[in-house]
Structures are given as structure tokens and as C-alpha cells.
Image (cartoon, helix red, strand yellow):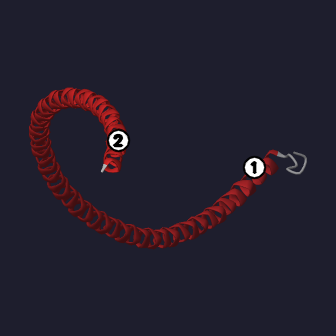
Amino acid sequence: MPPKKRKENVKKIKNDKSDKGKYRRSVLDLAVLKEHLALQRDVSCQAVSVRDELKYQIRDLKQALSQEKLDMKDITADLSREHQTLQRELEAKVEHLETNVSVLQKQLDQCHADLKKEREVRERTEEQKDAQISDLQRKLDSMEMEYEKILHACLDRLLWYLSEARKRWMDESSVLHQETKDMIAKLGLNPLDM
């Protein structure tokens, strides 16, 4: 049985070596785990710190968002009021312009009607004037013909009177001439010498 002991001793030595290796390994594993744990603690602390910082950022962002929402609501309300005011002003202007257009359209229609009446009156007046001018021209032509007839008749009469007066003056001058010749002859003078 002693050889058994040896085997057991060998096993024991092997086990001791193996236990020492396991121990070293366990110590190394423990050191690694401690380092890992320290790293995990650091990471955890950093995570908690980042989480807290993110919470503060989220809180700040929520506050900023709620402030933005309030500002947006105020801006929207202001824009809505301004839009309604502008809409009312625009509607008032449109109504005013429509009223002006209506008034101006009535005035334009009245002006067209007045212009039409004026044209009709002018056309009638021109027609009347043309008729009067034509009538006066006919009368003038008729008077001109009558005056020409009268003038020709007067001139013919004047020529006849002149002709008659000439004959009479010729007769009288012949008689007077003869009497003068006779008187000169009675005086003893030659009428041809004179």
C-alpha cells in the first residue's frame, strides 16, 4: 500500500500545485473582478452623474419647451388677433371700395345717359341748323334770283331812261344848237368860225 500513498502524495502534490494555481488564478480573478467592479462602479457613478445631468437637461428642456409653448400660444393669439383686425379692416376697405364702385358706376351710367341726351340734342340741333341753313340758302338763292331779275329790270329801265334822256337831250341840244346857230347868224357871224 505504500505505493498508494505515493500516488496519493503525487495526487496531493498535484492537487497542491493545482490548488496553488487555482488560488493564484482565483486571486487574479478576484483582482480582475475588483478592477472590473471598480470600473463598473466608476461607470455606474458616471452613469448616475450623466443621468442626473440628463435629468437636469430634460427638466430645463421641458421648462424651455413649456415656455416656448406659452410664447407660441401668445404669438399665435397675437397673430390671430392681428389677423382678425386685418381681416376686419380689409372687409371694411372692400365694403368701402364696393360702395365707391357702386356710386361711381351710377355716376358713370348717369354720365353716359347725359352724354347720350347731349348727343341727341346736338344731333337735333345740327339737323335743325342744317335745315335752317338749307332753308336760308334756298331763300337766299331765291332772293338772289329775284334781285338779279329786279336789278336787270332796273338796269333795263335805267338804260331805257338813259336812252330816252339821251334822245331828249340830243333833241334839245340839237334844238339849242340850232337856235344858237341862228342867233349867231343873225348877229352876222359865221358859226363855223367859232
Q: Please tell me which residue lies in front, 129 or 90.
A: 90
Q: Position of residue 104 (x, y in %)?
A: 19, 53
The residue that appears at 29% across and 68% down in the rendered structure is 124
Q: Secondary structure at mark 1?
A: helix
Label 1 or label 2, whichever lies nearer to me, is 2
The residue where tag 2 is placed is 18
Residue 79 vs 173, above or below: the answer is: above
Q: Please rate how many residues cluster around mark 2, counting C-alpha atoms within 10 Å: few if below 14, some from 14 to 19, many from 20.
A: some
Residue 20 vs 111, above or below: the answer is: above
The residue that appears at 20% across and 61% down in the rendered structure is 109
The residue that appears at 74% across and 55% down in the rendered structure is 177
Looking at the rendered structure, the kind of residue marked 2 is: Ser
User: Which quadrant is the C terminus positioned in?
Assistant: top right
For residue 87, side relative to residue 184 (left or right): left
Q: Position of residue 112 (x, y in %)?
A: 24, 61
- Label 1 close to label 2 by CB (< 8 Å): no
The residue where tag 1 is placed is 183
For residue 190, side relative to residue 105 (left or right): right
Q: Please tell me which residue lies in front, 76 or 33.
A: 33
Q: Secondary structure at mark 2?
A: helix
Q: Position of residue 181 (x, y in %)?
A: 78, 53
N-term mark: 1 or 2 = 2
What is the number of the mark on residue 21? Answer: none
